[in-house]
Amino acid sequence: MRRKEVGDHPIPSGNSAAALGLLRLGALTGERRYREAAEGVFALFAKPATEHPDAFAHLLQALDLAVARIREVALVAPPATADGEAVAAAVADLAAVVRATYRPHLVLAAGPEGAEQPPLLAGRTLLDGLPAAYVCENFACQLPVASPEELAALL
């Protein structure tokens, strides 16, 4: 039987990785059940994490995300070709702006206009036929922008 690590070492524990992933999934979908599952992990490891914080660095990163103001960015592109390359190329410049710096309290979703999954993309449209970026908090978005410079200003 393989040993299950509860603390974070050079490789994050499964519990910590799950908590962080669940929080990000909750931010992308708006579904509270994912956040509640992550909170269950926090409750389970609250005592050992406060006694030995150096052994739970990844879990503390997840806790930081849980208490932070999370911003969502939805990138919408023209409908894809059969191989999906058009979507990737259309949003590459906008995605590069989002990824240009470390943003631990931000989630990013990209897809073609009309996509319903993840829910962060639902109802998002192009801006005058151009790929659009929506910067949101709790699914309430600012007006969309189409240029990398405008997106950088919003972030």
Image: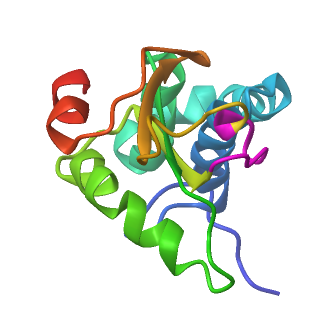
Q: How many labels were placed on the picture? A: 0
Q: Is residue 52 visible?
A: no
Q: Residue at horizontal 50%, vertical 42%? A: 59
Q: Position of residue 29 (x, y in %)?
A: 73, 35
Q: Main secondary structure of the magenta part?
A: loop
Q: Is residue 20 above or below residue 38?
A: below
Q: Residue at horizontal 32%, vertical 38%? A: 146
Q: Nearer the viewer, residue 8 or 63?
A: 63
Q: In the image, is residue 115 part of the stretch drawn in magenta?
A: yes
Q: Is residue 64 above or below residue 110?
A: above
Q: Residue at horizontal 49%, vertical 62%? A: 12
Q: Nearer the viewer, residue 64 or 53?
A: 64
Q: Nearer the viewer, residue 120 or 103?
A: 120
Q: Position of residue 63 (x, y in %)?
A: 50, 29
Q: Which residues are magenta?
A: 113-121
Q: Is residue 115 visible?
A: yes
Looking at the image, residue 89 sits to the left or right of residue 125; the answer is: left
Q: Quadrant of residue 36?
A: top right
The quarter of the picture where the N terminus appears is bottom right
Q: Quadrant of residue 142?
A: top left
Q: Is residue 153 above or below residue 130?
A: above
Q: Nearer the viewer, residue 88 or 43?
A: 88
Q: Position of residue 16 (x, y in %)?
A: 58, 49
The quarter of the picture where the C terminus appears is top left
Q: How is the image coloured?
A: rainbow
The furthest residue to the front: 128
Looking at the image, residue 69 sits to the left or right of residue 54; the answer is: right
Q: In the image, is residue 45 part of the stretch drawn in magenta?
A: no
Q: Residue at horizontal 43%, vertical 48%? A: 131
Q: Position of residue 11 (x, y in %)?
A: 45, 70
